[in-house]
Amino acid sequence: MSNNQPGFLSRRSLVGAIAALSAMQTVPAFASSRSDTSDTSDTSAASGRSDTSGERTAPPPSVTVYQAESATVSGAQVASGNSGYTGGGYLAFAARSGAYAQWTVEAAGHGRQELSFRYASEGTTERPLSLTVNGRTVAGSLFPPTGGASHWRTVTVRAALRSGVNTVRVTTTSAAGGPALDWLAVGTWRRADTDWSTAVVGSTMSRFTPARLGGWGYPQGLYLQGQYLVHKRSGDPEQLAYIKAWADRFVDADGAIGVTFDSLDSVQPGNLLLLLYAETGDERYATAARTIKTWLDTYPRTGDGAFWHALYRRQQLWGDGTFMVLPFLLRYGELFGGADRVRDDAAHNLVVYGTHLQDEAGGLLLHAYDEARAQTWADPATGRSAERWCRAMGWYGMATMTVLDSLPADHPDRPAIVAVLRHLIAALARHQDPATGRWFQVVDKGRAAGNWTETSSTSMYIHTIASAKARGLIDGRYDDVVRRGYRGVLDNVSLGPDGLVDITDICVGTNVGDLAFYFARPRATNDLHGLGAFLLMNELLGEPGGV
């Protein structure tokens, strides 16, 4: 499946959108079959890292990234055959010496700065490049083999730059040519010495076979969606095979799916069927996905046309439900037809949900709404629940970006959706914890005793805000919010005593409740809600070319 599938947001698709505006970008330092609710599954899994360093350092204030396709070249051309690159492609050098790529870069002042190159080089043959800055040789041999054409690595050197305009050139020095070059970054970039995404995926796969990852549930679907993004970057076939093996537990040889559907939650893993169909062409996955879509065709709705949260949650809308169903519908429409009709339906649902859930004065979203006002938690006048629970807003934010990606600029519902999104982001910025950069379990009650900062929702917020910035929906005033939030999530990522990565302070699945209920929810380590949200965020922000 293409990285441009709505909602499967990757570095390549996001940076490609930005690259259409400018090849040079300044990057802020953010460089069961039934689950009772959209957030009631308690699913923990272990994760680990693949790189050897345990050190983690905070992102810098900014770094300027120059995509390879912005360079002046001789004996090189833009290519796209290998996976995992950012922007519109990478530079492929001819198999000869003397080919080069040259960038014009700017420095704010005179002095030594770091120059970082992202590259890949298959096999064991050396394909060295010499580096010159302003005509002076800085390094005579860089870029050792990385082990594969899609195994991207970064090499960094320090060089003297003068204030203003500088030229940076790399030149092949052997008949073997040079490596694939993705970008040049100018500035001190130290996101981390570890590819945390690959680490999480590698450890989860080693500790849990597909049969032990869990049943047909949205936490599994979220996590495996994140694993799919890592696969699209790395090209590792084992990562895709793992997803396929998990899905094949539920889809038989004829495409029949052995799952009972009774809620929007049960729809979410259907996204994996669509991506597997696009990847493999196996009609079993199309048949199984069609079963879900047919079931949704008669699924009950509120009087104003929005999907009930579950058959057993009559007339209720939960913010969680938007992410559970709308991305599936949009991807299905793109693959099998009816995309315009599905887009209209998804946009309408998002408007209805936003209308009922958003606190007009404050901008945050309530967890749920009851059209019938029958639930004990429902306000008799508004039908809304009382509290602004963190992850419900994360689900809604990510669903919003997926829907907006699918809508044409002149879609009649687009202004209302963008207005809700901007109001939400502004409110989140006001309530970010200044001490940790994360957000609280109940977002607007950070000073209340018993409240705690939660990792999965923070990852979702950062994904949403950074995505909105990348699409021009918000301006740079939120860059520091993203920076501090990303750093706050990384502060909850560490090596465990077994040498594997732990991600802490993840709320388990959660119903609608009162304040004490939310505060008392278990704080899990390596719960799939947190692992999946982390992967989506980190694949977006984990490289300086990622936004």
Image (tube, rainbow, N blue to C red):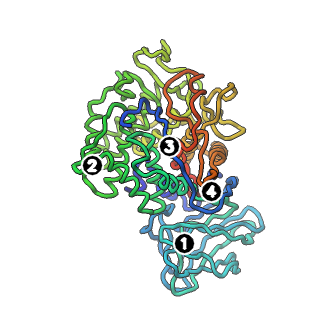
Disc marking residue 254: none
Residue drawn where x is 50% and y is 30% of the image: 510
Which of pointers 4 and 1 lies earlier in the amino acid sequence? 4
Secondary structure type for disc 3? helix
Disc marking residue 146: 1
Task: Classify the position of the N terminus by image quarter.
Answer: bottom left
Q: CA distance from mark 4 to mark 1?
A: 27 Å
**Looking at numbered disc 1 in the image, what kind of residue is underneath it?**
Thr
Pinpoint residue 424: horizontal percent, then vertical percent. 56, 33
Q: Would residue 484 be seen by someone viewing this image from the given angle?
A: yes
Q: Which residue is mark 4?
A: 26
Which of pointers 2 and 4 lies earlier in the amino acid sequence? 4
Q: Which residue is mark 3?
A: 528
Which of pointers 2 and 3 lies earlier in the amino acid sequence? 2
- Count neighbours of disc 2 (C-alpha within 10 A) and say few if under 14, some if 14 to 19, many if 20 or more: many
Which of pointers 1 and 3 lies earlier in the amino acid sequence? 1
Disc marking residue 286: 2
Residue drawn where x is 42% and y is 14% of the image: 374
Viewer-proximal residue among 526 and 165: 526
Q: CA distance from mark 2 to mark 3?
A: 26 Å
Q: Are marks 4 and 3 in contact (CB under 8 Å)?
A: no
216 vs 460, left or right, is left
16 vs 449, left or right, is left
Secondary structure type for disc 2? helix
The nearer-to-camera label among 1 and 3 is: 3
Viewer-proximal residue among 491 and 95: 491
